[in-house]
Amino acid sequence: MQKLTLGTEGELPVRIAQAIRDAIVEGRLIVDQRLPSEQELAEQFGVSRPTVREALKRLAAQSLIRTQRGATGGAFVNRLSFEEAAPQQITTSTLLLSMNAVDFETACEARYALERACVPFAAARRKPDHLAAMRTEIFRQGQPGLSDEGFCASDVAFHRALVDAAGNPVLSYQLAGAVEAMQPLMNMITFPARSRARIVALHGAIADAIEAGDAGAAEVALAALADYTAALAEDVRRTRRERAAPSPTAAG
Amino acid sequence: MQKLTLGTEGELPVRIAQAIRDAIVEGRLIVDQRLPSEQELAEQFGVSRPTVREALKRLAAQSLIRTQRGATGGAFVNRLSFEEAAPQQITTSTLLLSMNAVDFETACEARYALERACVPFAAARRKPDHLAAMRTEIFRQGQPGLSDEGFCASDVAFHRALVDAAGNPVLSYQLAGAVEAMQPLMNMITFPARSRARIVALHGAIADAIEAGDAGAAEVALAALADYTAALAEDVRRTRRERAAPSPTAAG
DNA sequence: CAAACATTTAATGTCTGACAATTGAAATCG
DNA sequence: CGATTTCAATTGTCAGACATTAAATGTTTG
């Protein structure tokens, strides 16, 4: 490994982590390559071992490296997999939405727009397991005893199956965050039996259209679902506003 | 802050980081709230200060907390902003593509599908600055002295402007990774003057359609651009194959 | 000779203790 | 009262040590 050079700003571990990260991104460190031991890195950078460790831990937190104990152990450049990266993206997306007070409308618009982009591919490439996953969730959503939270979780699972049906790992990864981050927002909505029935029917229509390879019909059903979800959210918003500041016009 | 409980699997700092992360995600720790000092955390969790530090650094690497030195310093729950989260998502997306040997076709398909989802909103909500950004990049792409890398960078900037024109921060964030991660893949393509002219013309058509509020026309131009880009990539692939294993049929 | 077992060894994981750097706030002085 | 100094709390960094792990190696035994 060629010598890495440090930046000049910020704290030591940050700069060391950045130097290694750059080496990985630019291909100077390749997958499964072993980094020098913590001791050696400490000497190379002229810092102590704890400082190097903090830098390595930052990278490990991003799944850029993995560490292994033992005689032949050390830090290795990690092959970043979609499976590893997705949970982190979901966490970040969820926090972005909750911390920045993104309104339900904006998040919903993004989600349905992105899902709509998947529909043509899903209709063309649908596989039995994706359709089965969608049907399973639809069935679950029809069970009477299901809690609102359970209903939302199943809804998310249905939409993830729809995205996965497009058969494009890049799409699945990029959309995982957008789909999952909706769950906390949807948990604020209550789903009475009538709303659930409507949603289940639309889910069924989408699954049918995908199974039939009819992208157009699926897009129509998806659009209807988007409208209905937005209307439900609007109901919640209106109710809350009225309860907060009741007005004669609203009461009449 | 209520006491946090640790999991039982894995290494200590990982478990501590997870406990704090959960507290943030579930809202038990709110934005700008100060965490106990490293010393106090160490006592609470029954570990040493370096162990706590590693946990905190993992969280800092994800921008979930920020630390501040001094008398009133400490670790604070960070308000995750789109601006902070985007670069990390871009790094991750870029590495995912390069490390998993995602073919140009798959990445390209994802990118154009996602951009297509933005077009209707961009056409409806376009703002002068987004259009200006698009025009600027188009002009830059027409300059004769521009390197291939510069051309790709400008292409990425153009597409980001297109996505931003949709006026939905969630879309902008989710798509930043997909758009930027294409750059290394596109850098493998050479863009002779004729290819550039074609691309610039299509970019112009997209900008015109967005400016006119004509989503349909923009989608048509975008689809043409997707086809043309795929064809260019196919050329590169074919040339490389022929050079690797020249055959009489390919030569004739 | 081969397989099971013990030993070695090199690396990370964790702890203890200390000092430096920073920064806000309190105390002090003009 | 305002400007300055001092102080105290906290993170940043260092040094050294021991614990733990797991592969490689050596040893014993069937």
Image: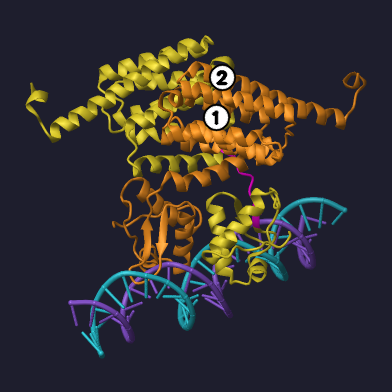
Chain colours: A yellow, B orange, C cyan, D purple
Query: In the rendered image, which residue does mark 1 sit on?
Result: A171
In this rendering, do the residues under marks 1 and 2 share a single chain? yes
Which quadrant of the view contains residue A14?
bottom right
At 31% from the left and 16% from the top, the residue drawn is: A197
Query: In the rendered image, which residue does mark 2 sit on?
Result: A121
Q: Where does the C terminus of chain B fall, quadrant-wise? A: top right
The amino acid type, in three-letter code, at marker 2 is Phe
Are the residues tagged 1 and 2 within 8 Å (C-beta)? yes
Position of A222 with respect to A185 (left or right) is: right
Identify whether A129 is placed above or below A186: above
Position of B192 with respect to A124 (left or right) is: right
Residue A187 is tagged as: none
Query: Real-space Cα distance between discs 1 and 2?
Result: 10 Å
Secondary structure beneath label 2: helix
At 72% from the left and 37% from the top, the residue drawn is: B188
Which quadrant of the view contains residue C30?
bottom left
Which chain is home to disc 1? A
At 74% from the left and 34% from the top, the residue drawn is: B190
Disc 2 crowd, CA 10 A, few/some/many (<14, 14-19, 20+): many
Front residue of A1 and A238: A238
Q: Earlier in the sequence, mark 1 or mark 2?
A: 2
The amino acid type, in three-letter code, at marker 1 is Leu
x and y percentages locating residue B203 in the rendered image: 59, 27
Position of A11 with respect to B98 (left or right) is: left
Front residue of A26 and B228: B228
At 47% from the left and 24% from the top, the residue drawn is: B211
In the image, the segment drawn in magenta is A75-82
Front residue of B70 and A82: B70
Which chain is home to disc 2? A
x and y percentages locating residue A140 in the rendered image: 38, 22
Q: Where does the N terminus of chain B fall, quadrant-wise? A: bottom left
